[in-house]
Amino acid sequence: MSVLEKRWVKPTLLFIVFLVFLALPRITLTFFGSTYLVELFVQSMIYGILALSLNLLLGYMGFPSLGHGAYLGIGAYATGICIIKLHMGTLPASILAILIATFAAALFGLFALRARGVYFLMITLALAMLVWGLAYRWVSLTAGDNGISGISRPQLGPWSLREITHYYYFVFGIFLLCLFIISRIVHSPFGRSLVGIKESESRMRTLGYNVWLHQYVCFVIAGFFGGVSGVLFIFYNGFISPPSLEVTPNMEILLMVALGGPGTIIGPFIGAIVIVFLKNFVSVYTERWLIFLGSIYILTILYAPKGILQAFDLAWKFLIGRSTAEKKQEKEYGK
Amino acid sequence: MDFWITQAFNGISYGALLFLFASGLSLIFGVMRIINLAHGSYYLMAGYLGLTLMRIGSTYFLAILGAAVIIALVGIIMVRVFLRKLSGNDLGQVLITMGFALIFQDVALLIWGGDPFTINVPKALSGSVEVGPLFFPKYRVFIVLMAVLIGLGLWLFQSKTRSGSMIRAAVDHEEMARGMGINVPLVYIGVYALGAFLAAVAGVIGGGFLSIYPGLDFEILPYAFVVVILGGRGSLKGAVVGSLVVGLIDNFGKVLFPELSYFTLFAPMVIILAVRPVGLFGKA
């Protein structure tokens, strides 16, 4: 058994990562003197929550949605409209916005889950365009092209979240909570039966499972987390406008999941970090970053179809050689 | 009354342009089940190519043909080198066409810059036709005529030629078509090239009245998806009806309910997908 396969390794590694994330604002301030990296991690965690929830659909239920960005949009717009137009407080506005996003998912799910395969892709795309169309054209509610702006971060007890480092810890807390809940869902009997349905719908139906209800509940849960990410997004950005709901950002969320590895708990978050960092760093060095991003789509699909984690895994095995267990097995089979 | 006739004509002529653009997407979606997010890029790139060809001295009609041939070649390379490896992988195909769409967008920005352009149409096609108190722009009449001509051509091709029946066979039942000895991979390449060709024709013609600018690719693409879904995959009749409906809904929606104009466009698509995913004229 190699060191990496020992039982204590994984929790220890996770704990170290946790400590690094806790210390991150301090580290970046000391070494770089700016909060730029902190901002990027806040973005990564917000998109990470969205990607984790899309992964419930794509990785565990086997339904790739082309329009999951719509729930971020609904959450963000609803928060903004409640605060700016209805003069609601921050907390009630946020809760109402998450409820609205969840309700939208409950409504959209009734339509979307009637379709399968390539038609599911189309119907989720159409629903996302519908949300975009309302944001773009329903000017009296959404201010059209201008978007909703002027949302500032609130005070949370003694801490002002206006400070990006404070907001970082707030988002980190919410992110950990979402990660915990999602991993509980995935490992619950409900999550296991979702995977069972993904493997074979007809088998699970024969076994007496209500296939549609499982999928519907999963769809609504994913919408709920999408709404959470939307609320975090508008308080981070202070601003939401129709371009955040177009086809391109919707595809980017999907790329994060595909790149990170669908069907793994943490993969989509890693995908989100990679995309957020690449977008920001590459656009500093070259104006041609769209070509770069486009190439990432193509390379991911061709060379890392199961995600970057698997690609790393293969590279790692290649570097350290096969593990002792594998060698032993090969010996036994006389290879 | 005049208002209704003028607006209906605007809707129909926009529908005609959409037909040129979407009939190719419908073929690709129908035969290969690919959601081609790069289809809008073909339209945009063709518009720019047409512009460049005319600047170096080509005539208007030669520019349409030249741009369409170049884009068809691009399409053949895409399908031959990349898309063919991913058959059956719906999500992979969507994401890879998205990657290409981003690259094309950036390449277009690199070559032609960010300013909007309009393609100069021949003198014979500018100005307008007067019918009583109404004026119809000649160019829009020309677009309707082109759509009718190309639609007829496609119909003859699909129903009267051997290649056309091979395509219909591949739409209806791919496995059976293979079993009958039809070279389905070759049909795929042909269909994809034809789809790209039609999108490019639409791009140059559309450049004459909608102008060409960065971002147009993803602006026009959703319209084509609505057309394909309303009409039904791979159905020519569906593409005709779908484009007319979408052209009219879009035009009247923007005039009558400006705040809900995109809602009136995408809501029918959602309902059709939920109730009858094969579309109004598609075969189950």
Image (tube, coloured by chain):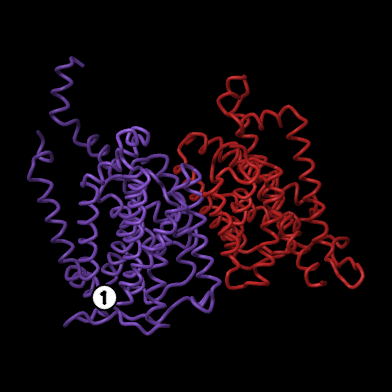
The residue pinned by badge 1 equals: A164
The vertical placement of A288 against B200, above or below, is: below
Residue at the far top: name it.
A334
Residue at (76% x, 52% y) in the render: B63
Give the x, y percent position of residue A60. 31, 45
Q: For the C terminus of chain A, which image quadrant?
A: top left
Give the x, y percent position of residue B143. 78, 56
Mark 1 falls on what kind of element? helix
Give the x, y percent position of residue B146. 80, 51
Residue in the foreground of this view, choosing between A98 and A178: A98
Q: Which chain letter goes with mark 1?
A: A
Residue at the far bottom: name it.
A87
Categorize mark 1 by other alpha carbons within 10 Å: few (<14), some (14-19), many (20+): some
B98 relative to A58 in the view: left or right: right
B55 relative to A27 in the view: left or right: right
Residue at the far right: name it.
B132
Chain drawn red in the picture: B
Residue at (30% x, 72% y) in the render: A95
Chain A painted colour? purple
Residue in the foreground of this view, choosing between A39 and B155: B155
The vertical placement of A177 against B189, above or below, is: below
Residue at (60% x, 39% y) in the render: B30
